[in-house]
Image: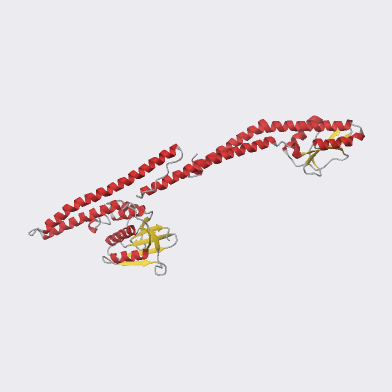
Amino acid sequence: MKLFFQLLPETLFGRTAAALLVAFLVFEAIAFGVVWFMVIQPLAARSADDLAAKILLSAQTWVELPPQTRADYEMELVFRHDLALAEVKTRLLQAAEANYFGELIADALTRRANQAITLKRGADPDWDWMEIQISDKLLRVGFDRQRYALKAPLAAVGVFLLGALLTVLTALFMVRQASQRMKSLALKAGEVGQGRAPELLPETGARELRELTVAFNRMAEEVQALLENRTVLLAGVSHDLRTPITRLRLALSLLDDADATLVKRMEHDLDEMNQLITDMLVFARSLKVEALHETDLAEVLTDLATQAALLGTVEWQAEGRAAAPCRVLVGEAALRRIVGNLLENARCYGLGAPVTLTLECNAEEVRIGVLDRGPGIPPEQREAVFRPFTRLETSRSREAGGSGLGLAIARQLADAYGWQIVLSEREGGGLSATLIISSCT
């Protein structure tokens, strides 16, 4: 049973088509068996027996006729009954090709004439011949196979099969329509998961599909409303928090006789609080997808590398950027935020070694790499660092800086645009963070 389910296609349409095909074949086999044994075989046997009786009667009549009238009788059999009858001296040696109706006639004639009758091949390939011994006469009788073969039941079976096939094809068409609607729902659900506002699906079709589509459209609108409310709420909270932080900073600056070290430490704490609020607000707004514009990535990365170089050494490399600029449809602000966060992450945890920024551009995809020489991230923890406020205490301490939102913001922005961020071990030690953008133009 497990093997059976493994052999089934994965898609709804494929599984339905396979089930309908199996059911169709089983039904047709049973139906054909019933029609064959209950209709075709009895009719064919009755028709063969009638023809055998006609042949035997014609042969006996020919023997009893006067010799001078036999020629006219033979001609009448040919024109009215498509039967050829004549006296012969030698038997045909070559057997005719086996066919179901011919075998039935030979068996029926054998039974009626009480002698072994077999089908023989003559000069005309459309005629079958049989030789009958009547008294002292050896008669050869031929009949047109196309006229006497049973066709009507077979034609009825063909029509029946065609009708069943059309029924299956109609069912498959309807299932395909439903599966396409389900696929559209899955694609739109992916857009909702990325924070986009998808175009609402048409609420048409069967009642169940209409109800599902209505529920999905309502869910998409509610998700967008929740995201907007979250952004507004965090923006309001950040504004309300920054006001007392500003007052505290002003109060610290007015203290004349306070410990300078303590004041500096408190100012540093206030700066961290302000930065945390800023990062939380950016994280909340990161699901807002901007319009895509054709952008020269080499120029953008050159600008980012120049800014990052003010805080540390950045080695900037791009394959063939001078000969062929890498122009891609992207959201530039999101791209700058992602690469900027990756550069900042590499600078903070790169142990002071130069950070390498790379660009690979081809017809299928763009790969932007940020490589450092820090302690790296264990493979089992590379996915966890993308969760908000996650730090790896063994290698990335709180004292090194950061709110734990940099990589989370980068991942959320990348997901919103359908991009991918991959963390891997750098050859020679360190971490390699790669941003992959598909459909390069």
| Residue 434 visible in the current orientation | yes
Compared across the picture, whether 192 is left or right of 278 comes to right
Residue at screen point 73% across, 39% down? 99
Residue at screen point 39% across, 58% down? 437
Quarter occupied by residue 218: top left
113 vs 32, nearest the viewer = 32
36 vs 336, nearest the viewer = 336
Quarter occupied by residue 114: top right
| Residue 139 visible in the current orientation | no
Q: Residue furthest left?
A: 257
Compared across the picture, whether 311 is left or right of 293 comes to left
Q: Where is residue 1 in the image (x, y as percent from the top left)?
A: 50, 39
Quarter occupied by residue 147: top right
Render colour scheme: secondary structure
Q: Position of residue 377 (x, y in %)?
A: 32, 56
Q: Residue furthest bottom?
A: 322
Which image quarter holds the C terminus? bottom left
209 vs 124, nearest the viewer = 209
Compared across the picture, whether 117 is left or right of 186 comes to right
* Depicted 130 relative to depicted 324: above or below: above
Q: Position of residue 81 (x, y in %)?
A: 80, 35
Q: How many marks?
A: 0
Q: Position of residue 369 (x, y in %)?
A: 36, 61
Residue at screen point 28% across, 54% down? 282
Compared across the picture, whether 99 is left or right of 365 comes to right
